[in-house]
Amino acid sequence: MFPLNQWYVAGFVWELQDKPLARTLLNRPVVMFRTESGEVAALEDRCCHRSVPLSCGSLEDGGIRCGYHGLLYAPSGQCIEIPGQVKIPGKACVKAYKVAVRNEIIWLWLGETADSQPVGQPPEIAAHDNPRYKYKGGVFHYDAPYQLIHDNLLDLSHVGYVHTKTIGGNAKTHMEAPTNVTSDGDNVRVVRWMKASQPPATYSAAWPFKGKIDRWQEIDFHVTHLNIFTGAVDADTESLEDPNRGGFHMRGFHGITPETETTSHYFWTMASSSHPDAPDNLELVYQQTAVTFEEDRVIIEAQYRNMCQFENASMIDIHVDAGANRARRIVAMLSQQAEQAA
Amino acid sequence: MFPLNQWYVAGFVWELQDKPLARTLLNRPVVMFRTESGEVAALEDRCCHRSVPLSCGSLEDGGIRCGYHGLLYAPSGQCIEIPGQVKIPGKACVKAYKVAVRNEIIWLWLGETADSQPVGQPPEIAAHDNPRYKYKGGVFHYDAPYQLIHDNLLDLSHVGYVHTKTIGGNAKTHMEAPTNVTSDGDNVRVVRWMKASQPPATYSAAWPFKGKIDRWQEIDFHVTHLNIFTGAVDADTESLEDPNRGGFHMRGFHGITPETETTSHYFWTMASSSHPDAPDNLELVYQQTAVTFEEDRVIIEAQYRNMCQFENASMIDIHVDAGANRARRIVAMLSQQAEQAA
Amino acid sequence: MFPLNQWYVAGFVWELQDKPLARTLLNRPVVMFRTESGEVAALEDRCCHRSVPLSCGSLEDGGIRCGYHGLLYAPSGQCIEIPGQVKIPGKACVKAYKVAVRNEIIWLWLGETADSQPVGQPPEIAAHDNPRYKYKGGVFHYDAPYQLIHDNLLDLSHVGYVHTKTIGGNAKTHMEAPTNVTSDGDNVRVVRWMKASQPPATYSAAWPFKGKIDRWQEIDFHVTHLNIFTGAVDADTESLEDPNRGGFHMRGFHGITPETETTSHYFWTMASSSHPDAPDNLELVYQQTAVTFEEDRVIIEAQYRNMCQFENASMIDIHVDAGANRARRIVAMLSQQAEQAA
């Protein structure tokens, strides 16, 4: 069971072109498409007639038409045409999911019960609409449960060992960085500073630092996504507590949505600031971020395969696990709540 | 369980050359080969010594020789030589299956009980030996249960949605075609007419029609195969009830044999008539038929994967399902009968 | 369950270079590496922190470092560094396996109980260090249980049917060769002679025989490996009972280690003698041996797939099975002993 009274990321608006988009989200096969009026619709991906995926069909003004016998469905999920048949049975319909679009992200609400109404809007991802930043993103598929991705992102001490070619740098500097873990309701915040450290490869390539840097990592965990604000200023030039500080900013959005209990979708964007001397650094930052996240995928999938091999083996905790463990307690509590409501 | 007192298609004679042919039929791994006298033999595909598939062996005058230790089996299944050993134990034998060849099709009889004798000969597929037609065929493998292929062939209303590039044409014309469903014992007949309709791509390419056409589909379902007679004449020139009518004829043979409960073999041929102005249309008809059947395979496999995803989801019936539903009742009854006999 | 109070082959020393080597042995994922002092270490392939395979990490003077958060393990399995953390919990360790190297072979001891001590040294494979021979080898992976490989090697009558292009020759000569099966404790010996026979392709290519040959096969089965001494002299020139006889010698080492109940590792070497007129025949013998063993793999994997298809089908024994059956009784007895000790 997963936490269900949540907005989960289902995709990005740029993925919806002239074809239906199929994606299994929290064990539900869903087909998404743009309606005539430009809204995004999300239906159960199964024609009620003979179970063919609606995503094999085609988009029409009125909705989506099954590619086998032509049943046409409105964005509401109601079948509105059965070719060659006058009467449309009341049962001829499919489940429609609640979706909302904000900052180019498509969010899906399942809810703990059939009639559960979304609690508020999806969260704002401000970096997507902040003129200071440009951003770009992607979708990765993981053969691993989603909480292993939470663990990875809440514990950036791994950066020095796993991402040696991009954002790593000196491994011990990462492991020894002072770390502050706090929480607030269902959210966890981890802040880490690496003052007077060497800039890693990506930072040096994207920003003209003068020498050593004061580097920060601010990780904000929410149940369905994380916002990670990392960056650096030239050492000893600005306070890392100043919310208006300058320097090189990387604002990562990480939407982690279970596909099934053992597989996951990873929807990510990276927004970065640019220096007047390096105005077009976005493509470089994007490419190196993709390399970095691919390195994570390799290690997390290897980790999960090994966890299956060593079923029931106990794990020991070390100092870097505080944030991840706190997040796991929150997810466990909300999952249990969803189970009781079911 | 499947209906068992039936002749099932096991292959075509042209598949048997100088090597054994392995195929799993109704859950039984079978090896087929030509005997010295030109007959077709079908044995359990397993050496009784150490279980190596006999299909990994070689053909000899006397039968088939295992490729591991050289045990030689007669077409009867009896082991007739154990190299290096004088005495051949009585238990050294494998099951032989009853096979019959008719119109270049190899048919296999399993029977509900071990001693069940075939009821009559395999059916005649007359188009294979009718000088009016030329024909050609193929074998497709499906990752889907065999009855989904029955459904597809008994309900040609899908042609307009699935086969847009070949035999489709106007989708609504197909869905609205008057349809007549009758049955006779274990057979179901579906007849559909599309008068004064536009010829679809394959028809126009294969036959010099003058304009609109009167098109027919006559589907004869038998438990293990279907004969589908489709074709057209120039509109208003001949009666679609005249058994001797001319025009463009496509006579399809469709042998549907379960490999397992969830996978199937689809043995098909297409026989077509040719016009004096287009004497060599067989290759075109064959190629476009292969494209058409491949389109069916794609949608049926997607349908089956989705049925597994949405286990236990109910389906609603529409007007086109009458023939397929009647065939399913027949198969259910005969399967039950086989189960009781077992 | 497998026999456990045994030395099993885990690899060859030349497989250990500058990277860790991962291999699952008897259901245990193991990582092997060379220590600073040149010894071979074998650890459970799982970091005790978050279960990432240690084989994804890197080698350092002190041992092996996890590639996720940098925990460093000594060859003893003890964690000796947790970067960024002073205290190392006592539980921070992984299992270390007993290994020994002899004649360039790495052997692993599991033992029936946690504190079981190895019984003696691993066996000597003298041909690896005999100046009369040169040798070379390889590692094959089998999708089949290990005892099917025992069966194959204990019954070389199959050589004439399976290895027609290399060491086969006349199939019936093999099947009719006089065979002597004896046993001594947990070892089985099969000796077969083919006097005045035609040399097979590999023999003719590797040695200048004058005409017919006296050929022998001496198979020594031990629970975890077989030594197979084959070869030939010119017919009627030397006694096959003379331990100092000359001619063409092929001394095969065959370490058969279960990966799991249904998959296996096959570690092999082939040592051969050379004639003054053909001093460099090793590469030819090696290449043709690899072809030969690949042929075995194909047939044994087909056999195993078929055994799964025909679950519970009984097998009949023939004259060639005496050695293999005796070996199976020994393995069954030792497996049962391991089960009782567990």
Image (tube, coloured by chain):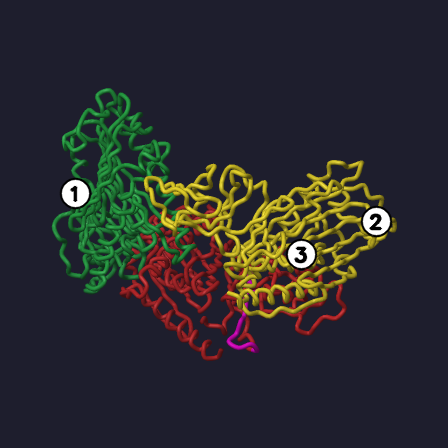
Chain colours: A green, B red, C yellow
- How far is mark 2 from mark 1, CA to CA? 86 Å
**Is label 1 on the same chain as label 3?**
no
Which residue is located at x 51 percent, y 42 percent? C33
Numbered range of the magenta stretch? B102-115
| Left or right, residue A222 beside residue B37 | left
Residue B245 at what x, y percent from top left? 42, 60
| Residue B105 falls within the magenta-colored stretch | yes
Q: Residue furthest bottom?
A: B340
- How far is mark 3 from mark 2, CA to CA? 25 Å
Residue A251 at what x, y percent from top left? 22, 35
Circle 3 is placed at which residue position?
C153
Q: Is residue B6 visible?
A: yes
- If you read the primary sequence from the N terminus, does the residue marked by circle 3 or circle 2 appear first? 3
Circle 1 is placed at which residue position?
A102
Circle 2 is placed at which residue position?
C212
- How far is mark 1 from mark 3, CA to CA? 67 Å
Q: Nearer the viewer, mark 1 or mark 3?
A: 3
Q: Check disc 1: other Cα within 10 Å, few if <14, some if 14-19, many if 20+.
A: some
Looking at the rendered structure, the kind of residue marked 1 is: Arg
Q: Which mark is residue A128?
A: none
